[in-house]
Amino acid sequence: MSPTPTPTPTPTPTNAPPHVYSSIGYDRAAEKRDDAAFQEASLRDPETRFLVLHGLKPLFTEDEAGPRPLFVAAEALAGHRPEAPFFLGRYQGRAVFAVDLEGEALEGGTYLELRAVGPGLARGEAGLLAFARALAHWRLRHRYCGACGGPMVTLLAGHCRRCEACGFDTFPRTDPAVICLVTSGEHCLLGRSRHFPDGMYSTLAGFVEPGESLEQTVFREIKEEVGIEVADVRYRSSQPWPFPQSLMLGFRCTAPFVEPVIDPTEIEAARWLHKSELLDPERRPVRLPNPDSIARFLIEDWLYSS
Ligand SMILES: [Zn+2]
């Protein structure tokens, strides 16, 4: 985005590590979503910028520093007939919207999977793109009313879908999932899913079921995956994971140092690793999860601070 950026102050909650894809570095300005005059003026304002998605992939420009999201003005979208834009908030003093183009893509850059480039982006930009992707995915999956099958219209600057036939409203969905580092003294337990890259092991995770507390989900998932009963479940931090619509709730817990008995329908391997094996990248017998993930944070948080 070019000249005269005015940094937008962002409240930073204490004890919240700035995980990639979080709402950091921009102002969501949620109070403006139902302000029709503001929305109309912003969509006409030549200073307003749009993030462009096509098939849920954001549009990037690339230079020697790597990919950067392309922020375009409204005139660049002329002729592309985007669906109602999503209002994302304010970034560097300007209103920012996202559009998910159907049909012909806008030229002028490269469409890339957000997950492939997220760790290298500025936090504010990664967060805006994560927000945009989540909203676009939600709208794509809510074309028709879940109650009566009627057509839906978009309200609240892209943040609500209403059924024209029965009036049912639906809002962007977020699925809570727990992710937990199991520790036993100087060891931690990591598991391997069959779709992981070669050699990668990570923390155990699973979706929260209706009627469960987060702590109960942690206990159930770990018992199911490795047959171990855990204790002392402590919350650490969370990360939005819009692939497509999860919120990862990160925990640490303790367990007896016993051999894991895996459920092969859930994971293909699990092993205890000593701190000394993980602290030295040269000696590490496994590949750790990517640095943009809360899984990596949970492992390093334990390795370096306790
Ligand atoms: Zn309906």
Image (cartoon, rainbow, N blue to C red):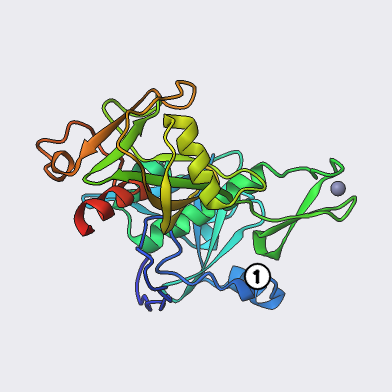
Q: Quadrant of the C terminus?
A: bottom left
Residue that mark 1 sits on:
33
Vertical order, 186 against 84 (above or below): above
At a point 49% along the width and 72% down the height, the residue shown is: 27
Q: Is residue 292 left or right of residue 287?
A: right
Q: Give the amino acid type for the residue marked by disc 1 in the picture.
A: Arg
Find residue 208 and report its image quarter: top right
Q: Quadrant of the N terminus?
A: bottom left
Vertical order, 121 against 37 (above or below): above
Relative image position of residue 125 (x, y in whole percent): 40, 60
Label 1 packing within 10 angstroms: few (<14), some (14-19), many (20+): many
Q: Is residue 50 visible?
A: yes
At a point 60% along the width and 71% down the height, the residue shown is: 30
At a point 16% along the width and 36% down the height, the residue shown is: 284
Q: Is residue 243 visible?
A: no
Say which of 66 and 44 sits in front.
66
At a point 64% along the width and 50% down the height, the residue shown is: 81
